[in-house]
Amino acid sequence: MLLVAWLPAMYALVPANGSTLGNAELIKLAWVAGAGLAGTILWGGLLGFRRAWSVAALSAPASTALLMCCYVLVMLLGPSSGGGGASADNDNAAGAGVVFLGVPTLLLMAVLLAVGAGAGSLLGILLGRRSAPAAL
């Protein structure tokens, strides 16, 4: 859940009327997105440091599923392009977005978690808390 906790803040920063974002909003969005990316890498680092590989392996699909649920929720609650509330266009866009964004999101989450897990595991080895794994 921590891996997608930044999504409501990003949704709140985007203007509802569809106007373009100003520099201040873009800077806020960049900080929130950066915090989300850093939090994901840090979570992977913690899991790698503790050698919780099963949790790390489950974190990528679980966080991807949460991101996709949040995406569908935002698409269904968002205003339609013609105004007057949600429409079938939003329904179609939500479904298409899950299809097109599901695999890239899973890969991105897996890479971010793997980078953090690798760094955390290496840190544990360098601190002498455990030995390096044996070579094959």
Image (tube, rainbow, N blue to C red):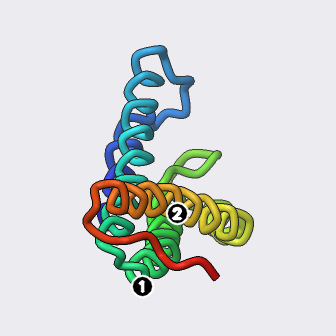
Q: 10 Å neighbourhood of mark 2: few (<14), some, or many (≥20)?
A: many
The answer to whether 72 appears left or right of 130 in the picture is: right
The one nearer the camera, 112 or 13, is: 112
Residue at the disc numbered 1: 54
Residue 30 in view in this figure: yes
Residue positioned 55% across, 33% down in the render: 18
In the rendered view, would you say 15 is above or below 133? above
Amino acid type at image mark 2: Ala
Task: Identify whether 9 is placed above or below 22.
Answer: below
Answer with the quarter of the image where residue 63 lies.
bottom left
What amino acid is found at the position of numbered circle 1 in the picture?
Answer: Ser
Query: At 28% from the left edge and 61% from the top edge, which residue is drawn?
Result: 128
- Distance from disc 1 to disc 2, alpha carbons, whole Å, reads 12 Å
Question: Residue 80, image x and y in percent?
Answer: 58, 51
Residue depicted at x 40% and y 64%: 121
Residue 135: name its quadrant. Answer: bottom right
Q: Residues within 10 Å of mark 1 (few under 14, many from 20)?
A: few
Report which residue position mark 2 lands on. 114
Image mark for residue 129: none
Q: Quadrant of residue 4?
A: bottom left
Which of pointers 1 and 2 lies earlier in the amino acid sequence?
Answer: 1
Q: Residue at x 74, y 65 (%)?
A: 100
What SS does tag 2 mark? helix
Q: Quadrant of the C terminus?
A: bottom right
Q: Secondary structure at mark 1?
A: helix
Image-based side of 21 in relation to 121, left or right: right
Q: Are marks 1 and 2 in contact (CB under 8 Å)?
A: no
Q: Provide residue 123's location: percent of width, then percent of height.
A: 36, 55
Residues 35 and 130: in front is 130
Across and down, in percent, residue 10 comes to 40, 42
